[in-house]
Every structure is written in C-alpha cells, then in structure tokens.
Image (cartoon, helix red, strand yellow):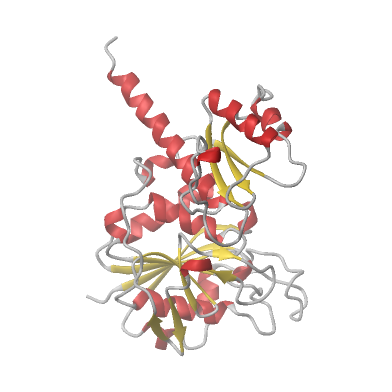
Amino acid sequence: MLKKLVFLGTGGTIAGIATDTADNVGYTAAQVGVERLLGAIPGLQHALGDSVLESEQVVQIDSKDMGWRQWCALAQRVQHHLARPDVAAVVVTHGTDTLEETAFFLSRVLDGQLLREKAVVLTCAMRPASSTAPDGPQNMLDAVAVARSESALGVLAVCAGTIHSARDVQKVHPYRLNAFDSGEAGPLGFVEEGRVRWVHPCPVVGASVCSRSVHHLSSAEWPRVEIVMNYVGATGATVRALCRVPATGEQPVRGFVVAGTGNGTVHEDLLLALREAQAQGLGVVRATRCAQGCVVPSSAIGELPDSQGLSPVKARIELALELINKAADAALVKTALPV
C-alpha cells in the first residue's frame, strides 16, 4: 500500500499575498489555500516519489491570532490522520510568528505512541506566496523530504533547510529567511538538495503531559496564564492587578510565568507578588529571558519552580496543560464521591 502524506493548512505568511511582488513585508497573511499552494510547487511530484498526497484546510489565519479553538481543531485533525494506517506523516503549513508554540503544543497533546512511530512536520515561510522569490515552495519540498525520512519521528519544524525539534525551536529573527534556531541544543539535521542529513536523532517522545484526549480538549477551558518579565525597576503591580477580581465575563488568572533576568532572578517586589499569587493557589513558574541556556536551580528563589529549560512561551503552554489536568482530575474525584 502506498503511504500518504497529509498536508494541513493553517494560513500564515506562506499563504500570504501582497499587491506588489517586491513587497515582502506589507502583505496580508492567510489568503491562499493549501491545495493551491501545493499546486504551484515545481518538482513536488518528484519529491513525493511513491507517496500519495492529501491536503486539508483546517483553519486560515495569521498565526499571531492563533488561539485555543484553532489549536484544538488542528490537534484533532493531526491526530485523526496520524492514526490512519495508510498515512506515513503529516505536514502542517503555519505562520512563523507562533510556529514554535504550536509545535510544542502538538508535541504535548498528541498521542505519544503515534509520535513514536510517525512525524508531524511544521513548515512556514518568511516571504508571502506573491513574492518575486518566495521561500515557501522550497520549505514545503524540504518538509516532504523530512516527512518521507524513516528517521523522522515526533513533532518537528523545517525552515530554510534546517530541522528543529518542537521543544527547542525558536523564532530568532523578524525578517531573514533563516529565522529559526534551536539554541544550545542545535538543529536535528539539514535538507540538502532533497536529501536529509541527520546530525542528531529525533528526541524520544515520552508520555503526553495532557491526560485528556485531543477529542476532549475542545470541551476544556484554556486556563488564563500570563507572562510577566523582570527588568530594571520591575514591580509586582502587574501581578497584583491581574490577581484582582476580574470584570464580569472576564476569565480569572490561573497562573504566571515569569521571564526572569539571568538565572531566573526576580526583583524583590515582583517576587513578593508572585509568592502572594502562589498563596492564592495560582500556578507560578520561573523561566529566563535569556535567549540561550536554562535556569539552574538555586536556593535563592527555590520556592518558584523553574521551567525545566523551556522558554517563557513554552513554559506557559506547559503550565496551562498542567492546570487543565488538575481541573479534570478534580472533576473526576468530585464525581466519584458518594452523594
């Protein structure tokens, strides 16, 4: 049986259009459907080899506007296709601005067993489809090469010929074509003239952090977790303001990630406010605002758990999923209690 590659479109710059082909900045994202994008790629059939292509438009959105509803829809469709025995891998076209967050989210909610057997490859573009020299077509061809590789497992990101893991990938530049980096971990591999050169094996995929299946995630409330930053003159005013009783119809804050300076250090007043939030039952995690490295555990502010090397935006996702788990567990306990 020929194995299928499924492309799922979500919009982004890769599907963007500008009125001037020389304009790589003043475009409107999410204008071209994934089927049309695929149809415009020279050499796609050759790259597919004996693989059969399928495509589906899940959402059509500028990735800066990505939200819980879109994430749930995408996770459900990715899981659906991964579970099909005739599907070898899934490729997701995505905007660059929040690609690192979507990749990490998928890596934490999709079925771990499926991710140990198949790959989900996110790809993107820094120039719109209307550009004189768009980078999207080559990125999609590279994504096909990675998706067809027997060594590809888990959730990966492919951009500018470089393969990144979902945990480590970060957007590090607002304009250049090679806009992504994996920091100290380094890339997993490279795509060179249609051939994949792996320099590291794909990370072993562990159990999902989320105890709820992706089909039930949409019924869960995405907990409000805010990110605050430490800087010269930082105070706890923002944290205290967010902890106050919210306005009618506004979701209360359930947790904070603090992007600390250096080794996760936090101004004394901000630290006091975060401790107050902890005392109110809110989740608090500290990360570092440094682009590389991770927080080394220290007794100085040890009462704030560190992010285990996750960037602030990824630590926010991890904390939110943990809060969803806790709420689900509490509901089960309540249901099991005798009346």
Q: What is the count of numbered marks?
A: 0
Tell me which residue sits at (66%, 69%) in the image: 173
Q: In the depicted view, which residue is nearer to us: 339 or 177?
A: 177
Residue 214: give x, y in percent of width and height: 38, 46
Residue furthest left as drawn: 1
Picture quadrant where residue 233 is located: top right
| Residue at x 60% of width, y 72% of height | 125
Q: Can residue 94 be seen in this view?
A: no
Q: Quadrant of residue 268?
A: top right
| Residue at x-position 62% and y-position 61% | 97
Furthest-front residue in this view: 299
226 on left or right of 88: right
Residue at the extreme top: 339
Q: Give residue 217's quadrant in the image.
A: top left
Image location (x, y in percent) of residue 35: 50, 71
Give whichever of 267, 179 is nearer the camera. 267
Residue 249 percent coordinates (x, y) = 64, 26
Can see residue 200?
yes
Q: Which quadrant does the N terminus fall into?
A: bottom left
x, y (%) of residue 312?
57, 50
Whether residue 156 is situated above or below residue 257 in the rendered picture: below
Q: From this view, report whether residue 190 is shown above or below residue 240.
A: below
Residue 227 horizontal side relative to residue 325, left or right: right
178 in relation to 13, above or below: below
Quadrant where the image shows the C terminus: top left
